[in-house]
Amino acid sequence: MHIKTIGESEISPDATLIAGVLQGLEPLPGSEGVLDAVDLRVLEVSGFEGKPGQVVTVPHREGAAVIVGLGDEATFESLRAASGNAVRAVKTGEAICLLGLAPIEGAIRAVVEGLVLGGYQYRAYKTSDEGESKVESVGVLGADEDDIASSLVGANATNMARDWTNAPALDASPEALAAMFVAGATALPIEIEIWDRTRIEEEKLGALLGVAAGSDRPPVLMIMSYRPDDARGHLGLVGKGITFDSGGLSIKTAPFMEEMKDDMTGAAVVAAATIAVARAGLPLRVTTVVPLTDNAIGGNATRPGDVLRPAVGPTIEVLNTDAEGRLILADGLGVVRRYEPDLIVDVATLTGAAKVALGEKIAAVFGSESGVSERILSAASRAGEFFWEMPLFKDYRKALDSNIADIKNITGSRYGGAIAAALFLSEYAGDGDWAHLDIAGPALSRETSGEQVKGGSGVGVRTLLELARLLAEADA
């Protein structure tokens, strides 16, 4: 789908017009002409009142109009959601969107993101075109090319992460997923280094090797480096890349295993965010480390009670092989620290406990200092993604003490699991600024609504892009 600028004189009579209405059928500025030409009885019969999420398609002169409800007021979030709802209702090849004329800050970005994210479809394995969107282009009235280009960076990167997350694990082995990331960075100033099993063994990444031991698909560690000449700071990223999580010998039950192809979402998010930062040309150095492996069952699989030795940091007694994400992140954090970034952020679908605490639409933030969490939350607010600060409560650390190693990978308690996991990671993050983003809840969208489409959400890509912008601005 092509997003473009358009003037009123260029509007084709065949194009579907996308107009917005507030609750009570008050037209959004720019949409008055559409509503004037619509028989209000059609809206009344359909039950359309302008409530959030409502969409109706009506005849309009020679063509059609898609009218979307925004609720009591137009906001960045309501415009983005309405744009996503509207683009899925368009049945023609061309549409003209009037929602960007709303008098709110960031209206064009909200509309462009809504159109691109809401119009997303993953069809790589579909064998027919039934249900495929017919929309080829959308003209956004009131936008200029720079507005659109800037808005597309984060939205396109989010959809890239969605593609990688939605890919079946059969076709997304560690090596294949690394190749997808490399392809996504083509023609960008990003240097990529890929460590195979031999190099991982030479580097003594014992935690990553321990998780990979049960799989016949070899592990990979990928390092992406974006180093602009005018860099004003240095951001380190680490993403959890479990390409399929069976639970290992602590095997999951079947219902909990069905969605485990998404356990590499953290890796997809940090890779896509790195690509977005480079595409935006931000003056910030980014070093991204992505450990990739299956967590499988095999004759050589790590056993509960085994002790793993990561390259840096405490030795680990593994009491539950299904708490494996924190193990590969331990080695990922150890590697990224070698590059001495100013701030390290890891992203992972790490714990069900985060989902229990915050539900399926909010991600958890743990920061080494309150100021670190504040920067993440500020970036998330600018991105329009939902994160919530959680406490890194040090009193819980003693529950991770091991009798035979330096630390164990679970506490054995059913309570505070997300905090315990963050405390575990803090042992490997070093003494500098560090944040842990647990995206287990919102990594998958359960329904299609607004800008969200059922499947991988790509949550965190735009937050990391906005964080990069904030860091670059702070050092300007």
Image (cartoon, rainbow, N blue to C red):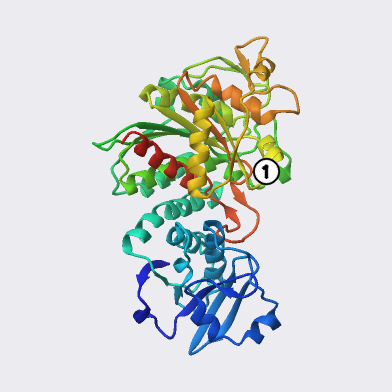
Residue 195 visible: no
Q: Is residue 189 left or right of residue 101?
A: left
Q: Residue shown at 38%/42% (left/top)?
A: 469
Image location (x, y in percent) of residue 245: 61, 38
Image location (x, y in percent) of residue 177: 46, 44
In this view, the residue in front, 284 or 225, is 284
Vertical relation: 151 (above or below) 460? below
Image location (x, y in percent) of residue 218: 48, 34
Residue 393 visible: yes
Vertical relation: 184 (above or below) 145? above
Image location (x, y in percent) of residue 28: 53, 71
Q: Residue shown at 63%/28% (left/top)?
A: 391
Query: Residue lying farthest bottom?
Result: 62
Task: Specify the quadrant of the image occupied by residue 72.
Answer: bottom right
Query: Residue lying farthest top?
Result: 404
Query: Residue lying farthest left?
Result: 229
Q: Residue shown at 67%/14% (left/top)?
A: 398
In this view, the residue in front, 225 or 475, is 475
As shown in the figure, which amino acid type bears the numbered disc 1? Met
Q: Quadrant of the N terminus?
A: bottom left
For disc 1, the marked residue is 257
